Image: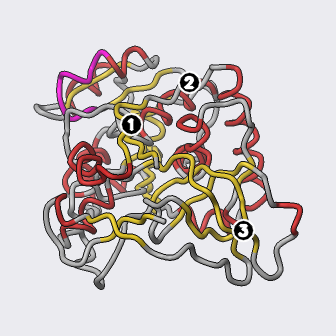
């Protein structure tokens, strides 16, 4: 079978397609025959070796949100799982004809929904839902979503609306993405200028909840547009810089919470399951739309990463065997 790896850090062309043996699932694992894998912008900095946590060990491989059918199960996994269509977050060799996944991370998905849509159940949509929950979002709240045209951001905009936000403001990296975010039901502002004043004009009292995946200066600026006792949830550092939190805005009762999907799923299993059920229902009715910008063959993995790095991109990049 084919898998994608890289043996040195660098540009997308360091990704190479290699022939390897089909792996055997170990205890608690399953083997998925890949239908589709959704790429992650985070992986581009891991590949370059310039992410906020520095270069990782080599050789390495992209991770991703995989949709596939379970072909084999490891020790401790019910054999009834064979043949099930699932979505799972896969951390190693996710760009492959077949992948290993932890059975506990697999989410059963409907057979009649497109793979690109149900792939969001592995990570992207649960991250958006959990971030809103950690921000103590409630109906009638105002919400600011950074990177609102991105893989997670475009889902967060819609979920905030579906959950009863009184106003959603989507911040995007360029004016070219404004209409896309407006089409999802949000007011939109661009980060390529002074964006804090337009946010204040839209929500004069400040936003109640803000979701930030950018980090760096964006995090500090986002704190400034929160309402008194507003809540900021930081779930990424796509800018390449970890945020430094200034103390002054916190004196107005504003708060900052960090988020990681692994910790959340382990500590809030019942709420995580409830979120997945809600998201699946909205996908089935079409109330939640998944924006896919590009579908790339596995053999062209470098092109998938080039597209992920293209800041003009809207929505998700997916790879198919």
Mark nearer the N terminus (1 vs 3)? 3
Secondary element at tag 2: helix
Q: Say if mark 2 contacts mark 3, CB within 8 Å.
A: no
Main structural element of the magenta stretch: helix, strand or loop? helix
Secondary element at tag 3: helix
**Alpha carbons under labels 1 and 2: distance apart:** 28 Å
What residue did someone put label 3 on? 103
Judged left or right of residue 228, residue 11 is: left
Judge whether residue 174 is colored magenta.
yes
User: Where in the figure is residue 243, as x and y percent of width and height?
Assistant: 27, 62
Magenta-highlighted residues? 172-179
Mark nearer the N terminus (1 vs 2)? 2
Q: Nearer the viewer, mark 1 or mark 3?
A: 1
- Where 250 falls versus 36 (above or below)? below
What residue did someone put label 2 on? 161
**Alpha carbons under labels 2 and 3: distance apart:** 32 Å
Judged left or right of residue 161, residue 186 is: left
Judge whether residue 101 is colored magenta.
no
């Amino acid at each position: 079978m084919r898998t994608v790896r890289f043996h040195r850090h660098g540009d997308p062309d360091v990704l190479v397609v290699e022939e390897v043996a089909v792996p055997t699932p170990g205890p608690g694992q399953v083997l998925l025959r890949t239908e589709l894998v959704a790429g992650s912008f985070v992986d581009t900095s891991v590949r370059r070796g310039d992410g906020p946590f520095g270069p990782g060990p080599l050789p390495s491989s992209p991770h991703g949100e995989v949709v596939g059918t379970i072909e084999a199960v490891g020790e401790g996994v019910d054999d009834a799982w064979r043949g099930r269509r699932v979505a799972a977050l896969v951390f190693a060799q996710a760009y492959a004809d077949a992948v290993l996944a932890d059975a506990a991370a697999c989410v059963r998905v409907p057979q009649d929904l497109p793979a690109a849509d149900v792939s969001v159940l592995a990570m992207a949509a649960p991250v958006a839902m959990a971030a809103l929950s950690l921000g103590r979002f409630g109906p009638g709240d105002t919400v600011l979503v950074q990177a609102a045209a991105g893989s997670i951001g475009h889902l967060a905009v819609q979920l905030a609306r579906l959950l009863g936000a009184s106003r959603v403001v989507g911040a995007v990296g360029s004016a070219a993405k404004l209409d896309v975010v407006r089409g999802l039901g949000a007011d939109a502002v661009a980060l390529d200028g002074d964006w804090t004043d337009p946010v204040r004009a839209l929500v004069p009292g400040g936003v109640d909840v803000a979701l930030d995946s950018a980090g760096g200066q964006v995090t500090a600026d986002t704190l400034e547009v929160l309402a008194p006792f507003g809540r900021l949830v930081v779930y990424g550092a796509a800018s390449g810089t970890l945020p430094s939190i200034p103390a002054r805005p916190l004196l107005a009762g504003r708060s900052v919470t960090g988020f990681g999907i692994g910790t959340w799923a382990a500590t809030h299993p019942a709420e995580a399951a409830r979120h997945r059920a809600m998201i699946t229902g909205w996908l089935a009715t079409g109330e939640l739309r998944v924006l896919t910008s590009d579908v790339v063959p596995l053999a062209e993995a470098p092109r998938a990463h080039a597209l992920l790095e293209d800041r003009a991109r809207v929505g998700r990049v997916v790879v198919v065997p």
